[in-house]
Image (cartoon, rainbow, N blue to C red):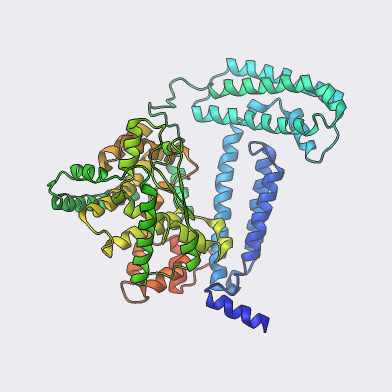
C-alpha cells in the first residue's frame, strides 16, 4: 500500500518515476572525477594530466561497451550527452597538457619537492635530515635554472609567461600544504625543515614573479582598458561550437547577430518616434534611463515586477509554476566592488540587485541607477527569476538531476532570453518606454555575439569591445567596462556571451516548428523543456519530436535557416 501511495504521489507532483539507464554511470563518473581531482591536487603537473587523461579514456571505453540500441529514449539522450562530455573534456584536457609541456621545463628542479608532497598524501614520515638536504639541493637547482632563464629568449607571449609562473605557483602551494601538514606535529621535521623550507618558499615566490614578466616586450597585455583576457583563436571556437551542437561557423553567427541588431534598431526607431524623439533613438534611450528610482526604493519594485511576470504566465497558462518555486526566491544586494564586474541583476533562487552605495563616486551612483531603471529591468527580472533562472534551477534539482553535469549556457541563458522574445510577442511591454527597455537588452545580446567572437578571433581588443557597447547599444561607459570585464576575466567559457541570443533563437525556432504549427500546446512545450534539465537544444528537439538519433549522431540542425 505504501509503494502504491508513493507512486501516486510521484505522478501527481509531476516527477519522473524512473531514471535512465545511464543515471548511475554518470553519477559514478562524477564521483570518480571529484575523487581524483582531490587526490591529485596539483593541476599543473604531469602526474595530474596523465591521471585525468586515463580517467576520460577509461570512461569512454566503458561507454562504448554499452548497447546503445537497447536503451530507452532518455537513455539514448544520456548516452549522447555523456559521450559528448567525455570527448569535450578529453580534447581540451589534451590541449592544456600540450600547452603545459611547452613551459614544464621551468620546474625541472622540482623532483624532490614533488616527491615530498606526494608522500605527504599517505602521511609517510619523512627522514628529516635527508629531506632538509633535498630542499637545499632543490633551491640550488632552482637558482641555476633561474639564471639560465634570464639569459634565454623570453616567452613569445604574456599568456605563456603567466602559465609558466602558474606552474611554479602550483608547485609552491602544494609544497607549502605538505610542509604545514608536518610542521609542529613532528618535532624532528620542525627542527630540520624550518630554515630550508623558508628558503625554498621565498625562492619560489621570487622565481614565479620573474617568470610572470619574462615575455617579449612587443606583446601587448593591456590595451589601456585594464581588462586582460585570453583570446582562444578560431580553431578553439569552432571546437567549442561543435561540442555545443551548434552547426554554424563564428562568421555565420556574427552575421546573424548583425541581422538581429538591425531588427532591434527598426523597433527602437518606432518607439523613439512614438515618444516624440523622431529617429534619435539614443535620445529616447537617455530619457528612459532617467526614469530611475531613488536608492532604497528599488528592491521593492523588483518584487512587484517578479509577481507581475508570474501572474502574466498564469493568466495565459504558458507554463506550470510550482507553488514552492514561487515561495522560495529571495533578494540580496550586490556590493559596490562586485558591481565593477556585475553592473546589473544576477539571478537564480536569489536575485542579486545592483544599485548605488554610499562609497561610490557620484558618477558611479548615477550609472548604477540609470543602468537599472524600471524599464530596463522589465526584461531582466523575469529573466533571472520565473520563468528564467530560478525556475530552471528549481526544476533541475528535481528532474534528471544527473544531467547538470552537462550544463550548457545555450540551454540556461538561451531559455531565459527566449522568454524575453516570447513575452515581447505577447505584448508584455506596456508602453514605448518598456519596449525601449526590452530592446536595449536584446541589442546588448546581439552585441555580445559580435564583440565576444571578434575578440576571440583576434579582431577586437577589450577597449574596442567597450566602445562598441557604448556606441551600438547605448551603455553607460562604466557598465560597458563591467560587461566586457565580466566576459573576459570572469568564470565564463568563451561561448557564454553568445549563448543568450543563439540559445534563445534555438528555442524560438523550435517553438515555431512545434507550437506555431499546432503540433503541441505552448504549455506542454514549455513544461517538457523545463523538465529535461540542461540539454543542448538540438538534442531536446529530437527528444520532444520522438526522433531516435543514431549512436554516432553529429549536429545537423540549421535553426537559423
Q: Residue at x 84, y 37 (%)?
A: 124
**Is residue 347 visible from the viewing direction of this image?**
yes
Judge left or right: residue 472 versus residue 144: left
The quadrant in which residue 379 appears is bottom left
Locate residue 487, reporting x and y percent: 42, 41
Residue 275 versus residue 107: which sits nearer the camera? 275
The quadrant in which residue 48 appears is top right
The quadrant in which residue 19 appears is bottom right
* Quarter in which the C terminus is drawn: bottom left
Vertical relation: 350 (above or below) 71: above
Locate residue 136, reporting x and y percent: 77, 19
**Is residue 554 visible from the viewing direction of this image?**
no
Judge left or right: residue 534 versus residue 7: left
Vertical relation: 336 (above or below) 552: above
Locate residue 133, reporting x and y percent: 82, 21
Residue 141 versus residue 341: which sits nearer the camera? 341
Q: Residue at x 48, y 68 (%)?
A: 323
Q: Residue at x 26, y 46 (%)?
A: 291
Vertical relation: 230 (above or below) 312: above
* Quarter in which the N terminus is drawn: bottom right
Vertical relation: 187 (above or below) 326: above
Q: Residue at x 61, y 79 (%)?
A: 7
Q: Tag count in the figure?
A: 0
Residue 478 versus residue 118: which sits nearer the camera? 478
Locate residue 137, reporting x and y percent: 77, 20
Amino acid at each position: 500500500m505504501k509503494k502504491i501511495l508513493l507512486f501516486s504521489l510521484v505522478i501527481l507532483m509531476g516527477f519522473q518515476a524512473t531514471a535512465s539507464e545511464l543515471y548511475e554511470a554518470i553519477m559514478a563518473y562524477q564521483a570518480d572525477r571529484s575523487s581524483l581531482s582531490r587526490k591529485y591536487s596539483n593541476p599543473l603537473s604531469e602526474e595530474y594530466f596523465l591521471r585525468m587523461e586515463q580517467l576520460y579514456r577509461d570512461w569512454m571505453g566503458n561507454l562504448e561497451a554499452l548497447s546503445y540500441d537497447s536503451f530507452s529514449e532518455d537513455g539514448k539522450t544520456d548516452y549522447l550527452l555523456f559521450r559528448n562530455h567525455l570527448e569535450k573534456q578529453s580534447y581540451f584536457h589534451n590541449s592544456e597538457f600540450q600547452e603545459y609541456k611547452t613551459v614544464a621545463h621551468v620546474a625541472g628542479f622540482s623532483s624532490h619537492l614533488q616527491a615530498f608532497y606526494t608522500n605527504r598524501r599517505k602521511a609517510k614520515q619523512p627522514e628529516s635530515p635527508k629531506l632538509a638536504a633535498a630542499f637545499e639541493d632543490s633551491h640550488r637547482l632552482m637558482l641555476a635554472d633561474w639564471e639560465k632563464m634570464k639569459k634565454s629568449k623570453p616567452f613569445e607571449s604574456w599568456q605563456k609567461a603567466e602559465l609558466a609562473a602558474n606552474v611554479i605557483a602550483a608547485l609552491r602551494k602544494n609544497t607549502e600544504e605538505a610542509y604545514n601538514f608536518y610542521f609542529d606535529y613532528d618535532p624532528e621535521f620542525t627542527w630540520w625543515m624550518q630554515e630550508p623550507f623558508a628558503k625554498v618558499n621565498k625562492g619560489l615566490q621570487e622565481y614565479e614573479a620573474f617568470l610572470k614578466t619574462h615575455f617579449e616586450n612587443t606583446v601587448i597585455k593591456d590595451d589601456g582598458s585594464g581588462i586582460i583576457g585570453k583570446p582562444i583563436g578560431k580553431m578553439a571556437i569552432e571546437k567549442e561550437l561543435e561540442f555545443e551542437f551548434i552547426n554554424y561557423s563564428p562568421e555565420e553567427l556574427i552575421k546573424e547577430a548583425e541581422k538581429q541588431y538591425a531588427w532591434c534598431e527598426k523597433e527602437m526607431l518606432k518607439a523613439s518616434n512614438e515618444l516624440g524623439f523622431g529617429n534619435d533613438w539614443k535620445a529616447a534611450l537617455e530619457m528612459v534611463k532617467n526614469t530611475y528610482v531613488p536608492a532604497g526604493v528599488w528592491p521593492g519594485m523588483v518584487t512587484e515586477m517578479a509577481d507581475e511576470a508570474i501572474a502574466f504566465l498564469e493568466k495565459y497558462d504558458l507554463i506550470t509554476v510550482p507553488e514552492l518555486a514561487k515561495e522560495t526566491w529571495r533578494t540580496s544586494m550586490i556590493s559596490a566592488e562586485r558591481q565593477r564586474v556585475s553592473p546589473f541583476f544576477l539571478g537564480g533562487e536569489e536575485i542579486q540587485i545592483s544599485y548605488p552605495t554610499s562609497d561610490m563616486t557620484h558618477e558611479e551612483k548615477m550609472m548604477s541607477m540609470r543602468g537599472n531603471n524600471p524599464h530596463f529591468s522589465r526584461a531582466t527580472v523575469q529573466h533571472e527569476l520565473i520563468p528564467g533562472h530560478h525556475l530552471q534551477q528549481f526544476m533541475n534539482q528535481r528532474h534528471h538531476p544527473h544531467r547538470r553535469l552537462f550544463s550548457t549556457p545555450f540551454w540556461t541563458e538561451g531559455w531565459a532570453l527566449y522568454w524575453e522574445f516570447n513575452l515581447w510577442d505577447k505584448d508584455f511591454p506596456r508602453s514605448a518606454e518598456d519596449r525601449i527597455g526590452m530592446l536595449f537588452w536584446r541589442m546588448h545580446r546581439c552585441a555580445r555575439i559580435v564583440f565576444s567572437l571578434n575578440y576571440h578571433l583576434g579582431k577586437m581588443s577589450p577597449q574596442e569591445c567597450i566602445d562598441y557597447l557604448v556606441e551600438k547599444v547605448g551603455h553607460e561607459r562604466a557598465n560597458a567596462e563591467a560587461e566586457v570585464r565580466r566576459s573576459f576575466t570572469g568564470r565564463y567559457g568563451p561561448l557564454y556571451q553568445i549563448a543568450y541570443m543563439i540559445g534563445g533563437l534555438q528555442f524560438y525556432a523550435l517553438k515555431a516548428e512545434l507550437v506555431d504549427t499546432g503540433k503541441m500546446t505552448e504549455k506542454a512545450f514549455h513544461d517538457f523543456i523545463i523538465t529535461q534539465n540542461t540539454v543542448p537544444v538540438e538534442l531536446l528537439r529530437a527528444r520532444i519530436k520522438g526522433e531516435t538519433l543514431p549512436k554516432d549522431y553529429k549536429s545537423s540542425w540549421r535553426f537559423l535557416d
